[in-house]
Structure formats: C-alpha cells, structure tokens
Amino acid sequence: MMRGRKAVAVAVRQPAGGILVHEELLAPRLYQNRVFRLPLLRGVLLLWDMLVLGTRMMAFAANVAAGQITDENGETSPAIGKGAIAVTLAISLAFAIGIFFLGPLALVGLVQRWVGTGALALVLEGIIRLVILLGYLWLIGRMPSIQRVFGYHGAEHKAINAFEHGEPLDVAHVRAASKVHTRCGTGFLLVVMVVSIVVFALVGNPPLLLRILSRIVLVPVVAAIAYELMRLGATYYRFRVVRWLVAPSLALQGLTTREPDDSQIECAISALERVLEKDGLLEPGRAIA
C-alpha cells in the first residue's frame, strides 16, 4: 500500500499470479485542507491513515485473495463488506486502547502500594506499555501469514527509499535499497509509547475514572505530538545526535519488516508507480526504469 498526495493505491498478488492495483482518491476536505496540514493536527490525519485507510486496503487485499474481487474497481460482491470493515475497525481500536493504554494502567494499579502514584508509577506504566508492544510485535511476527505481510512492508520501504534516492524503479535497484525508513509507522508507535509517559504525567493523579478517560481521549494528542517528533527526526536525520535519538525507532522496524522476494517487490513498485502517476510525477503507463 502506498499513499501519495492525491490518491492511495494497493497492489495485490492475485491467486492466478497477476498483480491487481486498486486506487482511491483521497478526500480533498481532509488531505487538501489547510487545517489538517497544521502541526499536531496532521498527526491526527496519520491516525486516520493507519486505522481507516489501512483497514480498508487490507480488506480489499483479503477479498482479492478470496477470489471475490477480480478488477481494480472492486465491483464484484466482496467477501468482506463495508459493515464488516466498520465492525473490525471498532474492535481493533478498542483492543488497541485496552491493551496498550488501559492495560498498563491496570497493572500499575495492582502494585500501587509499592510504587505510589507519582513519577515512578508513570514510568513503570510506560515501560509496561513498551514491553507489551514489543511482545505483541514479536509474537505476531512468528505467524507465517504475518511474516508475508512484513515482507510486503519491507518491499514498501525499499521501493520508497529507491525512489527518494533517485534510483530506477525496477526489481534490481529496489532490492538493493534499505528496508529501514525514517517515516515508518512502526517507529511512530515507539515514539507514541515514549510521548505517552510525558503527556500522562501532565494529567497527574486524578481519580481512577478520570485517569481511565485520559488514557482514551488523549490518544490523539499523544499521536499528534509523536508525529511531529517523527517528522523532525526525518528532516534532521543528517545530524549525528538526531541519528542517535531515532536509532531505537529504526531498530524496532526489524520486528515488522522482512527481506521481500521479487514478487513482493513487484507489488510495491506497482503501487508506488500508481500514486506517483496520480501526483503527476510519472507519465501514465510508463514505469520508472
């Protein structure tokens, strides 16, 4: 899956072996709105990307794999409909908030008599949140199907890195590119975990109900701040001190990327070419090679 300025595209390997590319134009009221280009607010838009667009594109890929969709417009009856996607998104969001934000709060509550309610409790909550994240990524990464997904993730990074370094978009050049990228969503998750410690520290130690609500309603705030920090890291990556600071988030990508095979690289190139074409950076029907 690739997102450009005007469209998002997903390239899926069909059961018969061909590549099916599906695109959707991005809603102008969101992606071309000056309000959502402002610092902090653009981080909220990234959450939309990760949750809504990501879920919809994964559902399209699943429908292609099931043989329910055979053209890029998705006109045939999908096995996974819009209602199922909405339910999946709601459950996924509730699961994420429950596991990564409410779960650590509950665990710290069990040892509150020993750690108190001050800075130590907040740091411990953040450490538990980070351990849960690392454990979750490690566990799902052992599943063969998820390993394939992580291979496609690596292919995405390689294709983008090749393009940003001015290399031709062909399998040989993309394969030689790095599978680590400074604007990766995995690194974003790590920054979220760290920023949450600071943001929740500002909340202090209100009654339990308010603490629970703060872990829910402040998620967009945490994400917005984390996104700005990630942008700064990518912009000033040439400085050694910045490279040191972002090194943990880049290292975390080792859990969510795998070396892709040629067929996965071909899919990544196809998706990237489609969004570049929509952005006017590539002539229609002509690959970069």
Image (cartoon, rainbow, N blue to C red):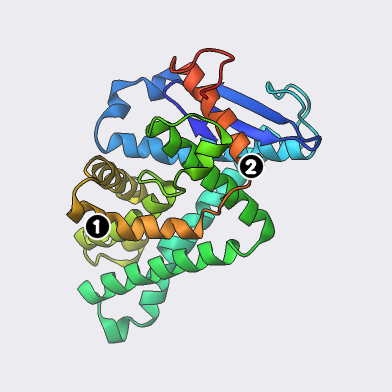
Does residue 7 show up?
no
Image coords of residue 215 (percent x, y): 36, 57
Instruction: Give the residue number, with chain letter if any, for mark 2.
Output: 262
Residue shown at 79% from the left, 33% from the top: 68
Residue shown at 56% from the left, 52% from the top: 259
Image coords of residue 93 (percent x, y): 51, 50
Does residue 198 show up?
yes
Res 13 label:
none
Dot 2 amino acid type: Asp
Along the viewing direction, whichever of 234 and 75 lies nearer the viewer? 234
Instruction: Give the residue number, with chain letter if any, for mark 1.
Output: 245
Asked whether the residues under the numbered discs 2 and 1 touch, taking CB atoms below 8 Å apart as contact, a structural biologist would say no
From the viewer's perspective, is residue 22 above or below residue 91? Answer: above
Location of the N terminus by quadrant is top right
From the viewer's perspective, is residue 128 above or below residue 22? Answer: below
Label 1 crowd (10 A; few <14 / some 14-19 / many >=20): few
